[in-house]
Amino acid sequence: MSAPPEPGDADADARPALERAAVRFRPVGTAALAGALVAAVWLAARLVVGDLSASVETTFALGSLAFGFGLLGWSGAVALGRGIESMQAHLDTGTGWTEADARRAMARILGFGLGVMLGATAVGSAVSAFVAAA
Amino acid sequence: MISTRFVLKRLLLLVPVLVGVASLVFSILHLSPGDPALTIAGERASEEFVRQVEESLGLNDPIWVQYGRFLADAAQFQFGESFIIQRNTPVREVLANKLPVTLELALYGQLIGISLGIPLGILSAVKQDSITDHLTRIGALAGISVPIFWSGPLLILLFAQMLGWLPTSGRISVLYNVEAIRVTGLVTVDTLLAGNWDMFVSAVRHMILPASVIGVYSMALISRMMRSSMLEVIRQDYMRTARAKGQGAKITVLKHGFRNAMIPVITVIGIQFGGLLGGAVLTETVFAIGGIGTLLVEAIKVGDYPIVQGTVLTFAFLFTLVNLGVDVTYSVLDPRIEQ
């Protein structure tokens, strides 16, 4: 008996491509939104304390760290996941780690990082524009 | 037959990997302490000069602009010039000189590891729980457990100092000018291409110890993997059927077992080889071979950011290429994997 379809599993159903893409990208989008919100709140707090420009740089760099880590982890899971699964099985060291779980987790991390980067860019650009106008 | 679609799909995966690595490098360099402009200008430079350097490097631009520019440059493999290790030399040139050193070491090391590890693993599995099996397993365990920074000096002590059979360090005798005959950058290949037998022998003698150190470690891991994989395969029904039909034990193992048992071993070989290309730093240090691993460590120490960026991205690129090779080998060994 086949396993029940999971959210984000493209082969599991015959829904329209757009709908399938939406299901697949929803976790990334949600994480990106959360990241942007965190960056905006953090930078707003820093604005009160002062030294915004350095904070924007650090926030963006931290966002790109999460984005890079997530992207690397995601592609690593896609490229090597099945090999690692089979290696674990052969070495009898199975920990319950699966390629699909790793891929989804990494997609959320990269989404969050992307959100932080976008949030920092938006706040930084807005403040620069405001300063230039003033 | 390998499908083009499969290879293209794997090649496409190179893009997110390289973007991911580039993002990590960018963020780590921006988060780490130190000012690249100050490093280039020097500690005693005037503030105005430091500002000029900052402007010429584009460090005054908003960080997202710098990020975009960095990704665009990385896509063209442009990392500027080294500003400390080889001042004003393009990073591409520095890497082109150092990469063959590490490549040669990794190739020979892996060759030793594969040529010893696979037969030993098969032997150990076929003769399970015999003296041969126990000895092989102890050897494998020792190979994994002994660190290179200890086994390297011990081998030098034995084969170079006490017995005097092999040289202690370097890639070739100082009597020879290998740069004059440089074609591929791989000393053993270049000397062979030049037809200079004495130089070739010298290069091979210099390669034996470092390659053996790496090879023993690889051999240990490969033989362990091969043993467990082969043990699983020889218990399969098709192996029993082949034996029941009168096929010899050796032929059954080599013809039917070997190919199937190789699949997980290929993964280990690929990951290991990729790791070695990423810099056998310890081996390079112990045997005074100036490869890409040593270059990276040096660049991090002195803060030569363009070299760090270029080296890390080259590692990532090579690692991904090796894994592409592994995937293609998988699909040759078992065409079902492509599905």
Image: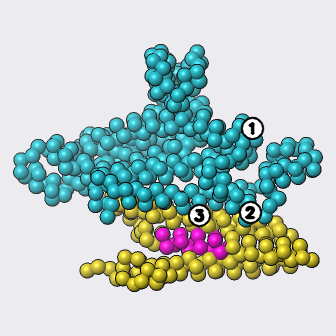
Residue that mark 3 sits on: A69
Residue that mark 2 sits on: B65
Chain coloured yellow: A
Which chain letter goes with mark 1?
B
Which chain letter goes with mark 3?
A
Q: Which residues are magenta?
A: A103-116
Mark 3 vs mark 2, CA separation in Å: 20 Å
Tell me the element at label 3.
Answer: helix
Using residue B224 as the reference point, say whether residue A38 is left or right of it: right
Tell me the element at label 2.
Answer: helix
Residue appearing at x 72%, y 41% in the figure: B82
Tell me the element at label 1.
Answer: loop
Give coordinates of residue B330: x percent, y percent. 34, 53
Disc 2 marks which amino acid? Val
- Quadrant in which the C terminus of chain A appears: bottom right
The verdict on a common chain for dots 1 and 3 is: no
Disc 1 marks which amino acid? Asn
Mark 3 and mark 1 in contact (Cβ < 8 Å)? no
Residue found farthest to the left: B245
Residue that mark 1 sits on: B88
Residue appearing at x 64%, y 80% in the figure: A34
Residue appearing at x 49%, y 52% in the figure: B320
Q: Nearer the viewer, residue B15 or A112?
A: B15
Please tell me in which quadrant of the rendered image residue B10 appears: bottom left
Q: Is residue A124 above or below residue B20?
A: below
Q: How is the image coloured?
A: by chain
Which chain letter goes with mark 2?
B
Q: Is residue A91 at all visible to an observer of this figure? A: no
Disc 3 marks which amino acid? Phe
